[in-house]
Every structure is written in structure tokens, then in C-alpha cells.
Image (cartoon, rainbow, N blue to C red):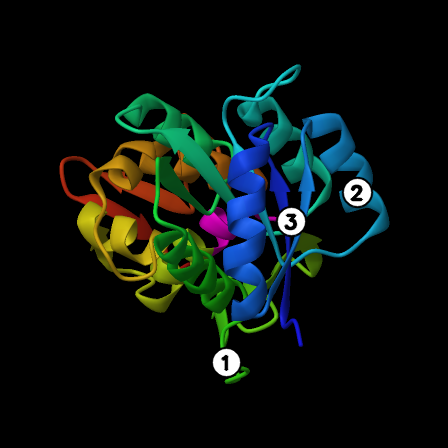
Amino acid sequence: MHDMRALLVDDDRDLARLLHDYLGPHGVELEHVETGAIALDRLDSRAYDVVLLDVMLPGADGFEVCRRIRRKHEVPIVMLTARGEETDRIVGLELGADDYVPKPFNPRELLARVRAVMRRARPGAVSERLSVGDIDIDVPAHKVSLAGKEVTLTSFEFRLLVALARRAGDTVPREELASALKGGSYDPTVDRSLDVHVSHLRQKLEDDAREPKRIRTVRGVGYVLVRPS
């Protein structure tokens, strides 16, 4: 019985076979495609719980594929990056990936990361709603509305907004925000991509980038979601 469907986008057939054999008994049905174009077609026609996306792909690279997926789909994305390529990880996270696993990796580690991403994407259905001014957040449903109109956020932007909204009016330190984005563990790579997520979030909340009224920067410390007086 499979409880999760994953789409692997990677041109390494040996890796695909290895993951298929390892993940199947752990409840993960793995489908394998070798190019981003085929992956995008599959995502239009089938529902997946997670996409495992290699950075080094023939044709459009993993970053471009990640960008295209994010334009249309909310599905969690775990990027597979060459070990030591920290810039790859930062770029991937900035484009809306939920996590990355450096190659070569142990299939058990990949499974653990995938399960962690899934837990964050489908948290327990405890009701939690947050309101800050005209921003309304339904945490379990992953829905945000601005003045009654729904706003589409990546999972990183959503977690960032929730972390700020839970402490609206207070300055939330960068380390705490980076930890919230990674599901509780601090990661310097995430810290470095934090400003990009904040600027995307400001755009989506119709905040002025030059003089933000909603999300203020506290230089050298962190960010604050302003409570309207």
C-alpha cells in the first residue's frame, strides 16, 4: 500500500532504479522521468505528493524546471544538488524549493527529508487562524488572503509569514526565521536566501519595497510584521 506518490526528475537511470527499489517498501510510489518537459506534463495530469528534482538535467536545468513548476503548482519540491554547491542550494530555495539533498546521498536520508517536507506541507489538522490587519492566514489549510482576496505563496513564503504573524509586532530574529523555514533546524544556506523570500512576500502582500509598511527590516537583527495601530 503506497501512502505517497513521488515524481523523480533525473537522467540518472541507476539512481532511479535504486530509489524505486528502496522507496517502494517504505510506502512511496516513485515515478521516474528524465527531463523537465516530461515532468511538467505529468504534473498537469496527475497529483503528486512531492517532486525530487535534480539540478543537472538535459535541456532546461533543474532551476528552470523548479521555476516553471512553481508558476502553476504548490507541490513540495526537494532538489538534488551536487555536493558542495552551496550556491545551487541557495538558488533552489530562492526559486521555491522546499529542501535540498546533496549528492551522493543515502536513500534513507532522502526518505527522511521527504517525510519532513510532507509533514510541513500537511501538518496535523489543528485549527489555527492568524489575523494581522487585513491579512488572514488559515495555517492548516495553507491559505492566505489579503483584504478578502486569496494570495498564492510558495511553502517557504507561507512559513515565513506564519512565523512573523505568530509574533506580529515583535522583531523576529533572522536565525529564528531561518529555523522556521527549515522546520526547526537552523541552516545558514536558508539564512542567506531569507531576504529574497521576504522581498517576494512583500510583493505578494502589496508592500512597497522601498518603504515597507507591512514587513519592516530591523537591520542586523531580523524582521517584524507590523500590527496596524
Q: Is residue 175 left or right of residue 225?
A: left
Q: Is residue 158 above or below residue 222?
A: below
> Decide: marks 1, 2 in contact (CB < 8 A)?
no
Choose between 27 and 84: the one closer to the eye: 27
Residue carrying label 2: 42
Residue drawn at x 86%, y 48% is: 45
Query: Image quadrant for the C terminus?
Result: bottom left
- Quarter of the view holding residue 143: bottom right
Residue carrying label 1: 124
Estimate the spatial distance between the alpha carbons at disc 1 and disc 2, rounded to whole Å: 28 Å
Range of residues picked out in magenta: 153-158
Residue 43 - label: none
Q: Which numbered disc, 1 or 3, marks the residue closer to the eye?
A: 1
Estimate the x, y position of residue 185 in percent, counting from the top left.
Answer: 23, 57
Residue carrying label 3: 152
| 157 in the magenta segment | yes
